[in-house]
Image (tube, helix red, strand yellow):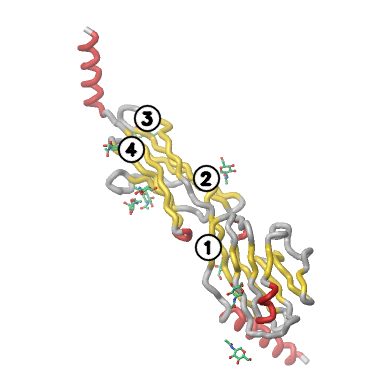
Amino acid sequence: MELLVLVSLCLLTFTGKTFGDNSDQTPITIKEDESVILPCFFNTSFTDYRFDWKNDGKDVFLYENVKVDPSIPDEQFRGRVSHFPDEVKSGNASITITQAKVSDSGNYTCLNIDSKKEKKIKLTVGAFAKPVVSVPQHNGDWALLRCKVLNAFPKPAVVWNDSKQNNVSDREPEVREKGGRYNITLETNVTKTDNYTCVATQNELNHQSNDSTSVNIRGKFNQVLFLVFNYCLFF
Ligand SMILES: *[C@@H]1O[C@H](CO)[C@@H](O)[C@H](O)[C@H]1NC(C)=O
Ligand SMILES: *[C@@H]1O[C@H](CO)[C@@H](O)[C@H](O)[C@H]1NC(C)=O
Ligand SMILES: *[C@@H]1O[C@H](CO)[C@@H](O)[C@H](O)[C@H]1NC(C)=O
Ligand SMILES: *[C@@H]1O[C@H](CO)[C@@H](O)[C@H](O)[C@H]1NC(C)=O
Ligand SMILES: *[C@@H]1O[C@H](CO)[C@@H](O)[C@H](O)[C@H]1NC(C)=O
Ligand SMILES: *[C@@H]1O[C@H](CO)[C@@H](O)[C@H](O)[C@H]1NC(C)=O
Ligand SMILES: *[C@@H]1O[C@H](CO)[C@@H](O)[C@H](O)[C@H]1NC(C)=O
Ligand SMILES: *[C@@H]1O[C@H](CO)[C@@H](O)[C@H](O)[C@H]1NC(C)=O
Ligand SMILES: *[C@@H]1O[C@H](CO)[C@@H](O)[C@H](O)[C@H]1NC(C)=O
């Protein structure tokens, strides 16, 4: 008896591993509000087979007894998920998600309930980063530059570069995350007259965006000249 349990345990572990190994597919990346097809195909020809989609434990879609159960999906997915009725009989269990949200990002599994086979696919729904720069403080010797990137996903890399593409950051960015969105503020203190560009990069989305500001640092010597000049003008 004990041996039997042990053997079944081993079998379970073994088959569990096999599913994971041969089912990983290329990750999909899209922009928010777009529609996406999550592909899933089983080499089965039954007309009445059943399949189940889940996203990190949340119910996404259930196809059972040749119909869709609309009460199954989690609130998050309700009314946004559909399958391909004409293709089901040829083993196609793909689904479409419309108006994708950043929170739809994650690992999806497509389970063929009868054969217990599953496919996994990773979805990333991105929100483009858009930097906005300002100069909150400056005087004749230095200027404090601020770059803000709001509500971006995945987390963008943010840098301050001068016009010769040198990194002029002198401190770490302040990063806030909530509901899968990132707000990043990167400040830097500069002491040279130049045009400075804040660049936000999201490699996963193949997206880069920037905003620039020109800074005029007069410097102490120039300030003295300026004062002397004004003094002379005055008299
Ligand atoms: C699909 O199943 C058929 C019949 O079982 C088999 O001949 C064929 O090789 C399978 N194709 C794939 C890609 O597994
Ligand atoms: C499954 O159906 C979708 C929608 O028609 C199609 O884009 C996809 O290529 C099909 N997959 C296979 C493996 O036939
Ligand atoms: C998705 O799966 C990958 C590995 O397969 C893992 O590194 C990642 O953390 C998972 N993501 C989530 C949101 O669970
Ligand atoms: C910004 O500066 C870094 C470091 O000098 C450089 O690697 C990068 O290419 C620059 N980025 C842009 C967009 O010019
Ligand atoms: C830019 O410089 C800052 C401060 O030295 C550093 O923390 C950051 O990693 C650098 N960024 C890049 C993209 O080189
Ligand atoms: C990011 O900034 C926006 C606009 O100011 C705000 O509504 C949101 O709550 C912020 N998110 C985080 C994670 O701080
Ligand atoms: C900027 O740097 C200058 C000199 O390096 C320093 O005196 C000034 O306090 C700094 N300003 C800020 C806002 O950090
Ligand atoms: C900064 O950019 C302006 C145009 O946008 C240009 O006229 C000026 O020469 C630039 N300054 C420097 C220091 O590159
Ligand atoms: C900033 O973006 C514009 C296009 O939006 C691009 O032409 C320019 O080269 C970018 N500048 C930097 C420094 O990345």
- Numbered disc in front, either 2 or 3: 2
Mark sitting earlier along the chain (3/4): 3
What's the amino acid at mark 4? Val
Mark sitting earlier along the chain (1/2): 1
Please name the residue that numbered disc 4 is placed on: 190
Please name the residue that numbered disc 3 is placed on: 138
Instruction: Please tell me the numbered disc located at residue 150.
Output: 2
> What is the spatial separation of the Cα atoms under label 1 and label 2, in whole angstroms?
20 Å
Q: Secondary structure at mark 2?
A: strand
Of the pair 76 and 146, the residue shown nearer to us:
76
Mark sitting earlier along the chain (2/3): 3
Q: Are marks 4 and 1 in contact (CB under 8 Å)?
A: no
Residue at coordinates 67% horizontally, 87% vertically from top-left?
11
Figure disc tally = 4
Residue at coordinates 60% horizontally, 72% vertically from top-left?
39
Of the pair 27 and 223, the residue shown nearer to us:
27
What's the amino acid at mark 1? Thr
Rendered position, 124 above or below 12: above
What's the amino acid at mark 3? His
Of the pair 100 and 131, the residue shown nearer to us:
100
- Numbered disc in front, either 1 or 2: 1
- Numbered disc in front, either 1 or 3: 1
- Numbered disc in front, either 4 or 2: 2
Q: Are marks 3 and 4 in contact (CB under 8 Å)?
A: no
Mark sitting earlier along the chain (4/1): 1
